[in-house]
Amino acid sequence: MKFALAQINSTTTVADNLDKVRDYTNRAAEAGAEFVVFPEATMSAFGPGLRDVAEANTESWRSEMTQLAAEAGITVIVGEFATSGEKVINLLAVYTPEGEREDYAKIHLYDAFGFKESDTVVPGEDPVVIDLAGESVGLTLCYDIRFPKLYAEISRRGAKLAIVSASWGAGKGKVEQWETLARARALDSNMFVAAIGQADPEVSGVEVPKKGPTGVGHSLVSDPFGHVISSLGGEEALEVVEVDLAVADKAAEAIPVLANAKLGY
């Protein structure tokens, strides 16, 4: 399986974000990727007025993503928002070249480190595993990565790769936490984990809202044995990765953590 990680910084200007998604998607297609993954909140960075942004742009954004996937000939996986009452839903959406669309609604909301996502976002309820390039792939978002039971459930549903798309909050030790959590979820669920985050605006120079989680970069792919097979720094970048998902079966045979699990895990 060959895919691309598009580590970008989105802003609150949806049109600019769309241009960047087009650019990175076309570059991923030219590199031979079967799909490209963008961070959480790619449609618009977290910030004030998120519901208004979603209400004004969701329909046109989805139309543009559908057209882009068809024209580029690869699947586009991207963080976006939709309205739900007076709040929004935080989604990881999948657009295929055939015009199909699926999405996952973030289950675990980021009410931590002084930020309260639940003030503006409605939580999802159900894990999602999709068919992607003939393989089962699980979808997750950001804070989900701190909850191993979700990844165990995705693995039990047949996924050999979990995607976690994030807009990780900066702070002391946060890069180390991000990297550790991605490798841990790979180890304790016998899956590859592709962890794609917003770039670090301090490195990229992109102006983003001052409050809220706006990215630390350091996207990575971990194999099911916890080995990092690809990683980025803080800059905006496109990384094309090729993995052999059969390694997930080897990991499950060598370290059958899910088969051996107790206490409801």
Image (spheres, grey):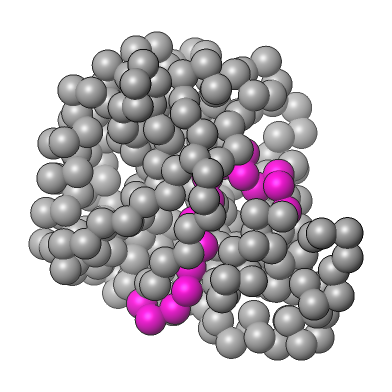
Task: In the rendered view, tell whether residue 83 sits above or below residue 255.
Answer: above
Which of these two is toward me, 236 or 171?
171
**Quadrant where the N terminus is found in the figure:** bottom left
Q: Residue at 65% of width from left, 54% of height from top?
A: 150
Which of these two is toward me, 215 or 117?
117
Side (left or right) of 183 relative to 115: right
Which of these two is toward me, 83 or 31?
83
Task: In the rendered view, tell whether residue 45 sits above or below residue 255.
Answer: above
Task: Residue 256: name its quadrant.
Answer: bottom right
For residue 143: magenta?
A: yes
Which of these two is toward me, 147 or 201?
147
**Residue 23: percent from the left, percent from the top?**
22, 49
Q: Residue at 64% of width from left, 24% of height from top?
A: 111
For residue 137: magenta?
A: yes
**Residue 181: percent from the left, percent from the top?**
72, 50
Task: Residue 255: name its quadrant.
Answer: bottom right
**Quadrant where the C terminus is found in the figure:** bottom right
Report the magenta residues as a range. 133-148
Task: In the rendered view, tell whether residue 201 sits above or below residue 188.
Answer: above
Q: Residue at 62% of width from left, 44% of height from top?
A: 144
Task: Residue 259: name its quadrant.
Answer: bottom right
